[in-house]
Image (spheres, grey):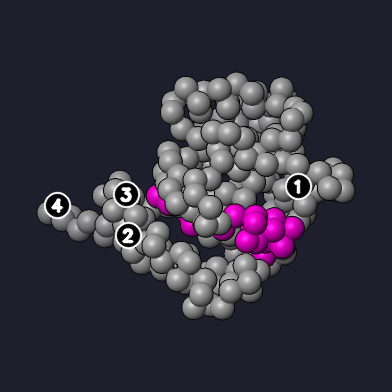
Amino acid sequence: MTDMTHSPAFDAAAEFDRQVRTLVTLGYPALSGRTPDGFAELVAPLRAEAVARTDSAAYAEYDPAATGRVPFVLVVGRELAPIERTLPLTTLHGGRLPGFVDRTFEPGSLERFVATGPTRPPGAGGVHLLFDVERGEEFCGVVPGDAMATVAERGRTLLTIEEGVALLTLVPETLVKSKCFSLGGSRCGDRRVPALWISKRAPKLGWCWEGNPHTWLGMASAGARHA
């Protein structure tokens, strides 16, 4: 007898609400100088777009740990929530140790890693949506500079540091051993490419040279941004 059961379609509205609840629970309203209700009002206009632009059928088998694919992520920009404050709010999936910035970022350098022209978030509200997100493990072992060129050729966009932190915060299952990811959308004018990986059982924000490949480090990208 044929099994006629099917996995339920991905519920974009429920996922958007979950992401908002997660950010509120972690204290993002206070970080952005708002009440929980005020924060909810800030992001509410993005809900309809999240639902309209998500192909629920494509995520019927939703397993971000295995596939590294996420339909959308709600991103709070660093002008509202500084990276130095948000990264310690992250943990690995099922973990407890907070994320941290690697000591190789010299004092004041993190502020210089900003979005490039093509990756600059649209609008001026400080929040936006990132669609069709991939952690990019296909680029593990590939020279980061080559990986970034391939992403551009496909018409996709590289993730910035704050977008990577948002992905880790809201879908921590995406950061797993041997499938960590670079964030080529934020640069500071030199050859360094920021990345998120696992160190001492916690997420770590570090960087690698754009010419040095690593077998455990891919290149995260997305299909589009919306604000």
Q: Which residue is mark 3?
A: 53
Mark 2 crowd level (few <14, some 14–19, many ≥20, 10 Å Cα): few
Q: Is residue 97 above or below residue 227?
A: below
Q: Nearer the viewer, residue 155 or 212?
A: 155
Q: Report the amino acid beneath label 2.
A: Ala
Q: Earlier in the sequence, mark 3 or mark 2?
A: 2
The mark lying in front, picked from 4 and 1, is 1
Q: Report the amino acid beneath label 3.
A: Arg
Q: CA distance from mark 1 to mark 3?
A: 32 Å
Region in magenta: 69-92
Res. 139 image quadrant: top right
Q: Earlier in the sequence, mark 4 or mark 1?
A: 4
Residue 156 picture location, percent across and down = 46, 32
Q: Is residue 99 left or right of residue 9?
A: right
Q: Earlier in the sequence, mark 1 or mark 3?
A: 3
Q: CA distance from mark 2 to mark 4?
A: 37 Å
Q: Earlier in the sequence, mark 1 or mark 2?
A: 2
Q: Are marks 4 and 1 in contact (CB under 8 Å)?
A: no
Q: Which residue is mark 4?
A: 2
